[in-house]
Image: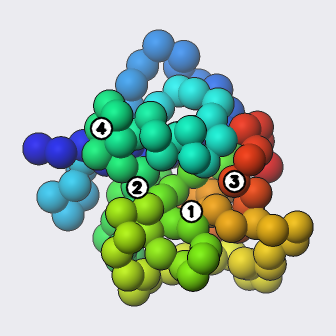
């Protein structure tokens, strides 16, 4: 089974030693306890797993609370135009009210603790 490097967290997990996994729709997700910029997160995920998380439908999005903690986390969605990190077409989004707002060239996407998405600068490596 390929493992999607789901939520590359922008903050320390509650348990710094545990790897968290979840399965949904035949996909496996793993939380990586690292502070990384989006491009570095993508590189890490592709090297050690498959890719950043592709949240392609409501069922995928519903699986995120199983492993998501209380901070913002990268997913594999980015703009230029909107597409998933594996270049697949976007057919589902879950942006928060007022998002995406593209303030200052925000081309990457984070999942917030309520599992709504925000666009963010791809170069940040701390909580949003």
- Given residues 114 and 106, the one toward you in this image is 106
User: Earlier along the polypeptide chain: callout 2 or callout 1?
Assistant: 2
In the drawing, does residue 96 fall left or right of residue 23? right
Q: Position of residue 29 (x, y in %)?
A: 32, 45
x and y, in percent, of residue 51 in the image:
36, 49
Q: Which residue is mark 4?
A: 49
Q: Calculate the distance from the C-alpha at mark 1 to the C-alpha at mark 3.
A: 19 Å
Residue at 63% across, 35% down: 36
N-term-proximal mark, 2 vs 3: 2
Residue at mark 1: 115
At 76% across and 45% down in the image, what residue appears? 124
Q: Is residue 12 above or below residue 91?
A: above
- Between the C-alphas of marks 4 and 2, the distance is 11 Å
Distance of label 2 from label 3 (alpha carbons): 15 Å
Marks 2/1 in contact by CB < 8 Å: the verdict is no
First in residue order: circle 1 vs circle 4: 4
Q: Are marks 1 and 3 in contact (CB under 8 Å)?
A: no
Q: Which residue is mark 2?
A: 53
As drawn, the residue found furthest toward the left would be 1
Q: Compare residues 41 and 1 and report the one nearer the observer.
A: 41
Location of residue 71 by image quarter: top right
Residue of label 3 = 122
Cα–Cα span, label 1 and label 4: 22 Å
Q: Earlier in the sequence, mark 3 or mark 4?
A: 4
Residue at the image position 47 percent from the left and 75 percent from the top: 83
Q: Are marks 4 and 2 in contact (CB under 8 Å)?
A: no
Give coordinates of residue 105: x percent, y percent: 81, 68
Q: Residue reaching furthest top?
A: 17
Label 4, residues with CA under 10 Å away: few <14, some 14-19, many ≥20:
some
Q: Secondary structure at mark 2?
A: loop
Question: Is disc 4 placed on a helix, strand or loop?
Answer: loop
Find residue 98 and report its horizontal and vertical position in percent: 79, 82
């Amino acid at each position: 089974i390929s493992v999607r490097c789901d939520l590359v967290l922008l903050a320390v997990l509650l348990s710094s030693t545990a790897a968290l996994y979840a399965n949904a729709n035949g996909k496996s997700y793993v939380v990586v306890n690292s502070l990384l910029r989006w491009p570095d997160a993508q590189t890490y995920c592709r090297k050690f797993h498959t890719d950043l998380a592709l949240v392609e439908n409501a069922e995928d999005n519903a699986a995120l609370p199983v492993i998501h903690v209380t901070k913002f986390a990268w997913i594999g969605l980015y703009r230029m135009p909107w597409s998933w990190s594996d270049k697949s077409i976007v057919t589902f989004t879950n942006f928060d009210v007022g998002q995406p707002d593209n303030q200052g060239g925000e081309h990457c996407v984070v999942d917030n603790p309520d599992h709504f998405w925000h666009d963010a600068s791809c170069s940040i490596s701390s909580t949003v």
